Image (cartoon, rainbow, N blue to C red):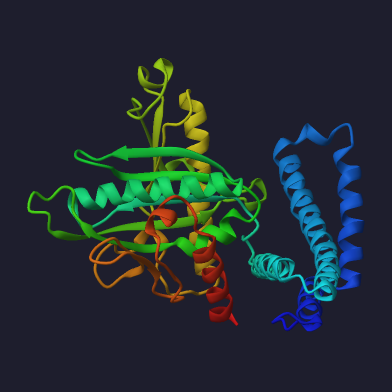
Amino acid sequence: MSSEISPDNFKKLASRLSDLLDGSERDEIKSELMRLDRLVSAQDFWADRASAEKLLGELSVKRKLIEEIEGLEKEISELMVLWQLAQEAEDSEEIAFVSQELKSLESRVDKLHVDRMLSGEYDSRSAVMAIRSGAGGDDATDFAEMLMRMYLRYADLTGMNATVLDSSQAEGAGIKSATIRFDAPYAFGKLSVESGTHRLVRMSPFNAAGKRQTSFAAVEVVPLIESSDEIAIPDNEIRVDVFRSSGPGGQSVNTTDSAVRVTHIPTGTVVSCQNEKSQLQNKIEAMRVLQSRLLEFRRLEDEAEKRKLAGDVKASWGEQMRSYVLAPYRMVKDLRTEYEENNPDSVFDGKLEGFISAGIKWRAQENS
Protein backbone atom coordinates (compact mmCIF):
# COMPACT_ATOMS: atom_id res chain seq x y z
CA MET A 1 0.00 0.00 0.00
CA SER A 2 1.44 3.37 -1.02
CA SER A 3 1.60 6.20 1.42
CA GLU A 4 2.85 9.80 1.44
CA ILE A 5 4.58 9.06 4.75
CA SER A 6 8.04 7.54 4.81
CA PRO A 7 10.61 6.87 7.56
CA ASP A 8 12.31 10.10 6.48
CA ASN A 9 9.34 12.12 7.79
CA PHE A 10 9.96 10.82 11.30
CA LYS A 11 13.76 11.13 11.04
CA LYS A 12 13.57 14.75 9.83
CA LEU A 13 11.12 15.67 12.58
CA ALA A 14 13.31 14.02 15.23
CA SER A 15 16.32 15.89 13.80
CA ARG A 16 14.50 19.23 13.94
CA LEU A 17 13.62 18.49 17.55
CA SER A 18 17.22 17.65 18.47
CA ASP A 19 18.33 20.93 16.85
CA LEU A 20 16.52 22.77 19.63
CA LEU A 21 18.88 21.42 22.30
CA ASP A 22 21.99 19.33 21.84
CA GLY A 23 23.03 16.84 24.50
CA SER A 24 25.31 19.23 26.40
CA GLU A 25 22.66 21.98 26.43
CA ARG A 26 20.10 19.53 27.78
CA ASP A 27 22.46 18.38 30.52
CA GLU A 28 23.20 22.01 31.38
CA ILE A 29 19.51 22.86 31.71
CA LYS A 30 18.86 19.79 33.86
CA SER A 31 21.72 20.80 36.16
CA GLU A 32 20.27 24.31 36.32
CA LEU A 33 16.85 22.88 37.22
CA MET A 34 18.40 20.93 40.10
CA ARG A 35 20.10 24.11 41.31
CA LEU A 36 16.87 26.10 41.09
CA ASP A 37 14.96 23.34 42.89
CA ARG A 38 17.43 23.57 45.78
CA LEU A 39 17.01 27.36 45.94
CA VAL A 40 13.22 27.02 46.00
CA SER A 41 13.48 24.62 48.94
CA ALA A 42 15.50 27.09 51.01
CA GLN A 43 13.76 28.44 54.14
CA ASP A 44 14.38 32.07 53.21
CA PHE A 45 13.23 31.62 49.61
CA TRP A 46 10.22 33.97 49.96
CA ALA A 47 12.17 36.66 51.86
CA ASP A 48 12.44 38.57 48.58
CA ARG A 49 9.11 37.91 46.91
CA ALA A 50 9.99 39.59 43.59
CA SER A 51 13.18 37.56 43.21
CA ALA A 52 11.34 34.40 44.25
CA GLU A 53 8.65 34.89 41.62
CA LYS A 54 11.28 35.58 38.94
CA LEU A 55 13.15 32.41 39.90
CA LEU A 56 9.96 30.34 39.80
CA GLY A 57 9.26 31.74 36.34
CA GLU A 58 12.70 30.66 35.13
CA LEU A 59 12.21 27.24 36.69
CA SER A 60 8.83 26.82 35.01
CA VAL A 61 10.09 27.84 31.54
CA LYS A 62 13.13 25.56 31.61
CA ARG A 63 11.24 22.57 33.03
CA LYS A 64 8.49 23.01 30.45
CA LEU A 65 11.06 23.10 27.62
CA ILE A 66 12.73 19.88 28.73
CA GLU A 67 9.39 18.13 29.31
CA GLU A 68 8.05 19.22 25.91
CA ILE A 69 11.15 18.06 24.03
CA GLU A 70 11.32 14.70 25.80
CA GLY A 71 7.56 14.25 25.45
CA LEU A 72 7.72 14.97 21.71
CA GLU A 73 10.64 12.57 21.27
CA LYS A 74 8.56 9.82 22.84
CA GLU A 75 5.49 10.65 20.73
CA ILE A 76 7.51 10.66 17.48
CA SER A 77 9.00 7.27 18.32
CA GLU A 78 5.61 5.78 19.23
CA LEU A 79 3.96 7.24 16.14
CA MET A 80 6.62 5.72 13.89
CA VAL A 81 5.96 2.28 15.41
CA LEU A 82 2.22 2.78 14.87
CA TRP A 83 2.85 3.76 11.24
CA GLN A 84 4.98 0.64 10.67
CA LEU A 85 2.24 -1.59 12.10
CA ALA A 86 -0.40 0.18 9.99
CA GLN A 87 1.75 -0.31 6.87
CA GLU A 88 2.13 -4.02 7.55
CA ALA A 89 -1.62 -4.39 8.13
CA GLU A 90 -2.43 -2.15 5.13
CA ASP A 91 -4.84 -0.27 7.39
CA SER A 92 -5.74 2.90 5.46
CA GLU A 93 -7.71 4.42 8.34
CA GLU A 94 -4.81 4.00 10.75
CA ILE A 95 -2.38 5.44 8.18
CA ALA A 96 -4.64 8.47 7.77
CA PHE A 97 -4.69 8.88 11.55
CA VAL A 98 -0.88 8.72 11.68
CA SER A 99 -0.67 11.34 8.92
CA GLN A 100 -2.90 13.68 10.90
CA GLU A 101 -0.95 13.13 14.13
CA LEU A 102 2.34 13.71 12.30
CA LYS A 103 1.13 17.12 11.11
CA SER A 104 0.16 17.98 14.69
CA LEU A 105 3.63 17.00 15.94
CA GLU A 106 5.25 19.08 13.18
CA SER A 107 3.22 22.11 14.28
CA ARG A 108 4.29 21.63 17.89
CA VAL A 109 7.96 21.37 16.91
CA ASP A 110 7.56 24.50 14.76
CA LYS A 111 6.15 26.35 17.77
CA LEU A 112 9.10 25.30 19.93
CA HIS A 113 11.50 26.62 17.28
CA VAL A 114 9.64 29.95 17.25
CA ASP A 115 9.71 30.15 21.05
CA ARG A 116 13.49 29.59 20.99
CA MET A 117 13.80 32.75 18.87
CA LEU A 118 12.77 34.79 21.93
CA SER A 119 16.29 35.61 23.01
CA GLY A 120 16.12 39.41 23.24
CA GLU A 121 17.28 41.21 26.38
CA TYR A 122 13.74 41.68 27.70
CA ASP A 123 11.86 38.92 25.83
CA SER A 124 11.53 36.71 28.92
CA ARG A 125 9.68 39.37 30.92
CA SER A 126 6.07 40.10 31.65
CA ALA A 127 4.58 42.93 29.60
CA VAL A 128 2.47 46.06 29.78
CA MET A 129 0.22 46.81 26.82
CA ALA A 130 -1.44 50.16 26.06
CA ILE A 131 -4.31 50.30 23.55
CA ARG A 132 -5.73 53.58 22.33
CA SER A 133 -8.36 54.45 19.75
CA GLY A 134 -7.35 56.44 16.68
CA ALA A 135 -9.14 57.90 13.68
CA GLY A 136 -12.67 56.68 13.09
CA GLY A 137 -14.98 58.09 15.77
CA ASP A 138 -17.26 55.58 17.50
CA ASP A 139 -15.98 52.80 15.26
CA ALA A 140 -12.43 53.44 16.47
CA THR A 141 -13.35 53.41 20.17
CA ASP A 142 -15.42 50.27 19.61
CA PHE A 143 -12.46 48.72 17.75
CA ALA A 144 -10.14 49.56 20.67
CA GLU A 145 -12.47 47.66 23.00
CA MET A 146 -12.57 44.73 20.54
CA LEU A 147 -8.75 44.62 20.63
CA MET A 148 -8.73 44.74 24.42
CA ARG A 149 -11.08 41.77 24.55
CA MET A 150 -9.01 39.96 21.90
CA TYR A 151 -5.81 40.23 23.93
CA LEU A 152 -7.55 39.27 27.17
CA ARG A 153 -8.94 36.18 25.43
CA TYR A 154 -5.47 35.39 24.05
CA ALA A 155 -4.09 35.59 27.58
CA ASP A 156 -6.83 33.28 28.82
CA LEU A 157 -6.17 30.73 26.04
CA THR A 158 -2.41 30.71 26.60
CA GLY A 159 -2.40 30.74 30.39
CA MET A 160 -1.15 34.30 30.84
CA ASN A 161 -2.42 36.25 33.84
CA ALA A 162 -3.87 39.50 32.46
CA THR A 163 -4.93 42.48 34.58
CA VAL A 164 -6.63 45.61 33.25
CA LEU A 165 -4.84 48.38 35.12
CA ASP A 166 -6.78 51.25 33.63
CA SER A 167 -9.43 51.92 30.98
CA SER A 168 -11.04 55.12 29.76
CA GLN A 169 -14.60 54.75 28.49
CA ALA A 170 -15.58 56.66 25.37
CA GLU A 171 -18.61 58.93 25.36
CA GLY A 172 -20.22 56.74 22.73
CA ALA A 173 -19.21 53.10 22.22
CA GLY A 174 -16.10 51.31 23.37
CA ILE A 175 -13.01 52.77 25.04
CA LYS A 176 -10.62 55.63 24.41
CA SER A 177 -7.70 53.70 25.90
CA ALA A 178 -6.72 50.80 28.16
CA THR A 179 -3.60 49.55 29.92
CA ILE A 180 -3.19 45.82 30.51
CA ARG A 181 -0.49 43.96 32.42
CA PHE A 182 0.38 40.43 31.26
CA ASP A 183 2.21 38.28 33.80
CA ALA A 184 3.85 35.23 32.24
CA PRO A 185 7.32 34.17 31.14
CA TYR A 186 8.09 35.58 27.66
CA ALA A 187 4.91 37.67 27.58
CA PHE A 188 6.88 40.65 26.26
CA GLY A 189 8.74 38.63 23.64
CA LYS A 190 5.48 37.35 22.22
CA LEU A 191 3.23 40.39 22.57
CA SER A 192 5.84 42.93 21.45
CA VAL A 193 5.23 41.90 17.84
CA GLU A 194 1.69 43.25 18.26
CA SER A 195 2.95 46.84 18.65
CA GLY A 196 1.79 49.16 15.89
CA THR A 197 -1.34 50.47 14.22
CA HIS A 198 -4.28 48.12 13.67
CA ARG A 199 -6.98 48.87 11.06
CA LEU A 200 -10.60 47.71 10.99
CA VAL A 201 -12.80 47.78 7.88
CA ARG A 202 -16.49 46.92 8.30
CA MET A 203 -20.06 47.99 7.70
CA SER A 204 -20.40 50.48 10.53
CA PRO A 205 -23.06 49.71 13.17
CA PHE A 206 -22.92 53.41 14.08
CA ASN A 207 -23.74 54.67 10.60
CA ALA A 208 -27.42 54.96 9.82
CA ALA A 209 -26.68 54.66 6.10
CA GLY A 210 -24.85 51.38 6.75
CA LYS A 211 -21.76 52.51 4.89
CA ARG A 212 -18.40 50.83 5.11
CA GLN A 213 -16.15 52.47 7.69
CA THR A 214 -12.39 52.31 8.28
CA SER A 215 -11.10 52.90 11.82
CA PHE A 216 -7.79 52.62 13.61
CA ALA A 217 -6.30 51.78 17.00
CA ALA A 218 -2.71 51.84 18.26
CA VAL A 219 -1.08 49.15 20.40
CA GLU A 220 2.08 49.71 22.47
CA VAL A 221 3.86 46.92 24.36
CA VAL A 222 6.75 47.44 26.80
CA PRO A 223 8.58 45.03 29.13
CA LEU A 224 7.55 45.13 32.77
CA ILE A 225 10.12 46.79 35.01
CA GLU A 226 12.09 44.69 37.50
CA SER A 227 13.75 45.83 40.70
CA SER A 228 17.20 45.28 39.18
CA ASP A 229 16.58 47.77 36.37
CA GLU A 230 17.20 50.77 38.63
CA ILE A 231 15.16 53.36 36.77
CA ALA A 232 15.37 56.29 39.20
CA ILE A 233 12.76 59.00 38.76
CA PRO A 234 13.31 62.16 40.84
CA ASP A 235 10.20 63.42 42.64
CA ASN A 236 10.47 66.79 40.89
CA GLU A 237 10.09 65.06 37.51
CA ILE A 238 6.65 63.62 38.23
CA ARG A 239 3.20 64.99 38.98
CA VAL A 240 0.71 62.77 40.81
CA ASP A 241 -3.03 63.38 40.53
CA VAL A 242 -5.74 61.40 42.29
CA PHE A 243 -9.31 60.97 41.13
CA ARG A 244 -12.33 58.75 41.64
CA SER A 245 -12.29 55.46 39.78
CA SER A 246 -14.83 55.31 36.96
CA GLY A 247 -14.55 51.70 35.86
CA PRO A 248 -16.24 48.55 37.19
CA GLY A 249 -15.55 47.86 40.82
CA GLY A 250 -16.91 47.47 44.30
CA GLN A 251 -18.09 50.25 46.56
CA SER A 252 -14.63 50.83 48.04
CA VAL A 253 -13.21 51.35 44.55
CA ASN A 254 -15.78 53.74 43.11
CA THR A 255 -16.60 55.95 46.11
CA THR A 256 -13.10 57.15 47.06
CA ASP A 257 -10.36 59.07 45.28
CA SER A 258 -8.24 55.93 44.92
CA ALA A 259 -7.32 56.17 41.22
CA VAL A 260 -3.92 57.66 40.44
CA ARG A 261 -2.54 59.45 37.38
CA VAL A 262 1.25 59.91 37.19
CA THR A 263 2.78 62.32 34.67
CA HIS A 264 6.48 62.19 33.83
CA ILE A 265 7.13 65.86 33.09
CA PRO A 266 10.33 65.60 30.98
CA THR A 267 8.82 63.14 28.47
CA GLY A 268 5.12 63.94 28.88
CA THR A 269 4.40 60.26 29.56
CA VAL A 270 1.12 59.77 31.44
CA VAL A 271 0.15 56.57 33.28
CA SER A 272 -3.10 55.91 35.14
CA CYS A 273 -4.09 53.04 37.40
CA GLN A 274 -7.47 52.48 39.03
CA ASN A 275 -7.50 48.71 39.37
CA GLU A 276 -6.45 48.50 43.02
CA LYS A 277 -8.59 49.51 46.00
CA SER A 278 -6.14 51.87 47.67
CA GLN A 279 -4.49 55.01 46.39
CA LEU A 280 -1.08 53.74 47.52
CA GLN A 281 -1.45 50.46 45.62
CA ASN A 282 -2.51 52.29 42.49
CA LYS A 283 0.43 54.68 42.76
CA ILE A 284 2.89 51.79 43.15
CA GLU A 285 1.45 50.05 40.08
CA ALA A 286 1.36 53.28 38.05
CA MET A 287 4.99 54.02 38.91
CA ARG A 288 5.98 50.52 37.84
CA VAL A 289 4.26 50.96 34.47
CA LEU A 290 5.89 54.38 34.07
CA GLN A 291 9.29 52.86 34.79
CA SER A 292 8.57 50.14 32.22
CA ARG A 293 7.91 52.76 29.57
CA LEU A 294 11.03 54.72 30.48
CA LEU A 295 13.03 51.47 30.40
CA GLU A 296 11.87 50.89 26.83
CA PHE A 297 12.76 54.48 25.97
CA ARG A 298 16.26 53.97 27.37
CA ARG A 299 16.65 50.67 25.49
CA LEU A 300 15.80 52.34 22.20
CA GLU A 301 18.24 55.15 22.90
CA ASP A 302 21.02 52.73 23.86
CA GLU A 303 20.54 50.80 20.62
CA ALA A 304 20.49 54.09 18.67
CA GLU A 305 17.25 53.02 17.02
CA LYS A 306 15.58 55.79 15.08
CA ARG A 307 12.10 54.33 15.13
CA LYS A 308 9.53 56.03 17.32
CA LEU A 309 8.32 54.59 20.58
CA ALA A 310 5.23 52.44 20.22
CA GLY A 311 3.27 55.13 22.06
CA ASP A 312 3.96 57.54 19.20
CA VAL A 313 2.39 55.30 16.57
CA LYS A 314 -0.02 57.26 14.39
CA ALA A 315 -3.32 55.40 14.44
CA SER A 316 -4.31 56.51 10.95
CA TRP A 317 -3.99 55.82 7.22
CA GLY A 318 -0.66 54.60 5.89
CA GLU A 319 0.64 53.44 9.26
CA GLN A 320 -1.18 50.13 9.81
CA MET A 321 0.66 46.87 10.43
CA ARG A 322 -2.44 44.67 10.43
CA SER A 323 -5.85 44.92 8.78
CA TYR A 324 -9.06 43.32 10.04
CA VAL A 325 -11.52 43.29 7.15
CA LEU A 326 -15.14 42.30 7.84
CA ALA A 327 -16.67 43.73 4.62
CA PRO A 328 -16.89 43.27 1.66
CA TYR A 329 -14.89 40.11 2.38
CA ARG A 330 -13.62 38.60 5.64
CA MET A 331 -9.89 38.42 6.34
CA VAL A 332 -7.25 39.42 8.86
CA LYS A 333 -3.84 40.11 7.33
CA ASP A 334 -0.52 41.19 8.83
CA LEU A 335 1.10 43.58 6.36
CA ARG A 336 4.65 42.92 7.61
CA THR A 337 4.66 39.13 7.53
CA GLU A 338 1.94 38.58 4.88
CA TYR A 339 0.38 36.05 7.27
CA GLU A 340 -3.42 36.00 7.00
CA GLU A 341 -6.48 34.15 8.23
CA ASN A 342 -10.00 34.09 6.83
CA ASN A 343 -11.89 33.79 10.11
CA PRO A 344 -11.89 37.20 11.85
CA ASP A 345 -14.28 35.96 14.55
CA SER A 346 -11.70 33.37 15.62
CA VAL A 347 -8.95 36.01 15.68
CA PHE A 348 -11.05 38.43 17.74
CA ASP A 349 -11.73 35.52 20.08
CA GLY A 350 -8.03 35.42 20.94
CA LYS A 351 -6.61 32.86 18.53
CA LEU A 352 -3.49 34.86 17.69
CA GLU A 353 -0.79 32.17 17.76
CA GLY A 354 -0.39 32.18 13.98
CA PHE A 355 0.09 35.95 13.82
CA ILE A 356 2.44 36.02 16.81
CA SER A 357 4.58 33.13 15.51
CA ALA A 358 4.81 34.78 12.09
CA GLY A 359 5.73 38.07 13.78
CA ILE A 360 8.51 36.49 15.83
CA LYS A 361 9.96 34.83 12.70
CA TRP A 362 9.73 38.12 10.77
CA ARG A 363 11.48 40.00 13.56
CA ALA A 364 14.27 37.41 13.74
CA GLN A 365 14.85 37.74 9.99
CA GLU A 366 14.84 41.55 10.21
CA ASN A 367 17.47 41.45 12.97
CA SER A 368 19.68 38.83 11.35
Q: Residue at x 81, y 79 (%)?
A: 11
**226 w.r.t. 118: above or below:** above
In percent of width and height, residue 269 lies at: 38, 50
Can residue 225 be seen here? The reply is: no
Can residue 70 be seen here? The reply is: yes
Q: Residue at x 36, y 39 (%)?
A: 167
Q: Quadrant of the N terminus?
A: bottom right
In percent of width and height, residue 48 lies at: 75, 36
Side of 36 where 264 appears, left or right:
left
Among the 4 quarters of the image, the one containing residue 323 = bottom left
In percent of width and height, residue 18 lies at: 82, 73
Q: Residue at x 40, y 38 (%)?
A: 166
Q: Nearer the viewer, residue 281 or 10?
A: 10
In percent of width and height, residue 252 lies at: 43, 16
Among the 4 quarters of the image, the one containing residue 302 = bottom right
Give the residue furthest to the left: 209
Q: Nearer the viewer, residue 77 or 86?
A: 86
